[in-house]
Image (cartoon, rainbow, N blue to C red):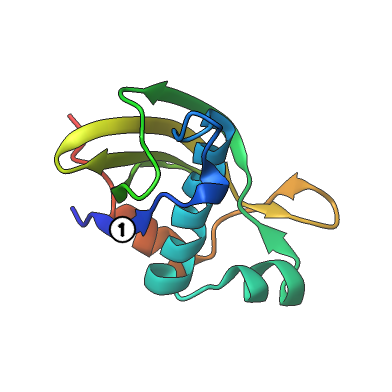
Amino acid sequence: MAIYAQRSTVMFQHCDPAGIVFYPRYFEMVNVVVEQFFDEVVGWSFGQMHVTERMGVPMGRIAAEFHAPSRLDDRLDWTLVTGRVGRASAEVVIAASCKGEARMTVRGTLVMVALDEMAARPWPDRVRAVLKDYAEEQA
């Protein structure tokens, strides 16, 4: 199983007046992780996917656990792994930590959709193969 990893810095734009990440901003950060995974690993940028091919991967389901606050200038280490990969969907687990301390975990389902119809479409074979490479071990 492969694990996608990246690091980001908590910026002023992410924080509330107390200097901690305002929780809706985490969802924007999660989307950045997904977008960079598709660009860097799958080789399918959101520009190509959305604008040129009129496809998308919105979250059909998302659940978040917030373990500890993140503060301005924290360096967050993000990971992404997949779970079950279906015909047109894939479960993902995206987690953030700072210096080994868990900050948040998201469990969600990405859905492959045709943007003009907003209808599910099967994963392209090459995308399905990459998603399966990042799948957690299944019991």
Q: Is residue 87 visible?
A: no
9 vs 67: above or below: below
| Residue at the far right in the pictured view | 116
Q: Quadrant of residue 71?
A: top left
Mark 1 Cα shell of 10 Å, populated few (<14), some (14-19), many (≥20): few
- Residue 132, how many percent across, how many down? 32, 54
35 vs 126: above or below: above
Name the one closer to the observer, 27 or 60: 27
- Residue 23, how many percent across, how many down? 52, 30
Which element type, helix, strand or loop, lies under badge 1? strand
Q: Is residue 17 visible?
A: yes
- Residue 77, how many percent across, how many down? 27, 50
The C terminus: image quadrant:
top left
- Residue 42, how many percent across, how many down? 42, 69
Residue drawn at 44 percent across, 33 percent down: 20
| Residue at the far left in the pictured view | 100
Residue drawn at 64 percent across, 76 percent down: 48
Q: In the figure, is residue 51 to the left or right of 82?
A: right
Q: How many marks?
A: 1
Residue drawn at 27 percent across, 57 percent down: 5
Residue that label 1 marks: 7
107 vs 99: above or below: above
Q: Quadrant of residue 114?
A: bottom right
Q: Quadrant of residue 67?
A: top left
Name the one closer to the observer, 139 or 15: 15
Disc 1 residue type? Arg
Name the one closer to the observer, 106 or 122: 106
Residue drawn at 63 percent across, 46 percent down: 58
